[in-house]
Amino acid sequence: MRVALFVTCVNDTLYPRTGQAVVTLLERLGVRVEFPMGQSCCGQPQFNTGYRREAEPLLRRFARAFDGYDHIVTPSGSCAAMVRDNYPRIGRRAAAEGRGGELAEAAASVVPRTVELSEFLVDVLGVVDVGAYYPHSVTYHPTCHGLRMLRLADRPRRLLEHVRGLELIELPGAEECCGFGGTFAVKNAAVSAAMGADKARHVTETGAEAVCTVDNSCQMHIGGTLARAGSTVRPVHLAEILASTEEAPW
């Protein structure tokens, strides 16, 4: 089984420890992880802001970079959703405009192989207990793309429930958006900040030591809001918790 890590732009530039945690975790489970150097942005920023044609070269690049791998694993629900939900749209539109079916074929080649980390662990490897140890109280925020587009359901929670030492605390209003939404946070800053403040308040109300997400972008937004409010709650990616063990705390 050939497995590739799609680390994503946000992780690569701002949260490299998340990608490192994924590799540590998967290698501990006996999975050899490869990192194709040809990978770059999936095109989500361009697509979401209306520059659909500009996202096409990135689709092609993605398909080339991950050609030949059985699974493309990413620690980002939003980027996985971009590939699985929006790549086919790009391909269909190109074909409808008479520009051939090459993009549709490229999309079809990667869609079934691209999985978010919790999907890979639960559905492909068939594990929920990954041997993790994290002696802290944690609340979980299910990000919008993971919840509504990938339909991750309880996969991340099941993984957290099997972490030794971890106390999982229910988050009030868990399914409400944190307000980030990529460029939404830039174009609608006041609304985004207000939504973030609501989410941060709910996180603080739990009394948890950490808030966990499956997207570093949401982690960044929630964490920044918490920090500005003087909160000591630590924002942490699911991969970092699952990579942590009693012998080697992440």
Image: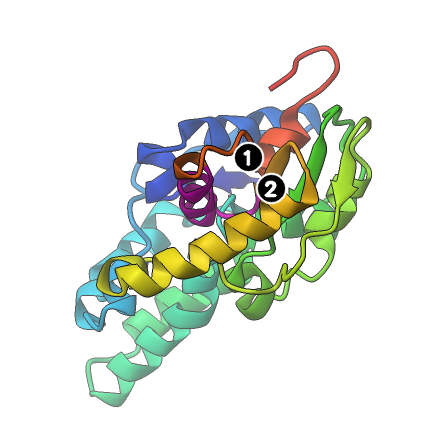
Whether residue 238 can be seen here: no
Q: Position of residue 73 (x, y in %)?
A: 53, 45
| Side of 212 relative to 227 (left or right) | right
Residue under label 1: 236
Q: Would you call the spot at circle 1 few (<14 residues within 10 Å), some (14-19), or many (20 or more)? A: many
Q: State yes or no: residue 222 in magenta.
A: yes
What residue is pinned by disc 2? 212
| Image quarter of residue 225 | top left
Q: Magenta: predominant secondary structure element?
A: helix
The residue lying at 47 percent from left, 43 percent from top is 219
Q: Amino acid at mark 2?
A: Cys
Q: Position of residue 84 (x, y in %)?
A: 47, 66
Pointers 1 and 2 in contact (C-beta within 8 Å): yes
- Give the number of callouts: 2
Helix, strand or loop at label 1? It is strand
Q: Which of these two is toward me, 242 or 228?
A: 228
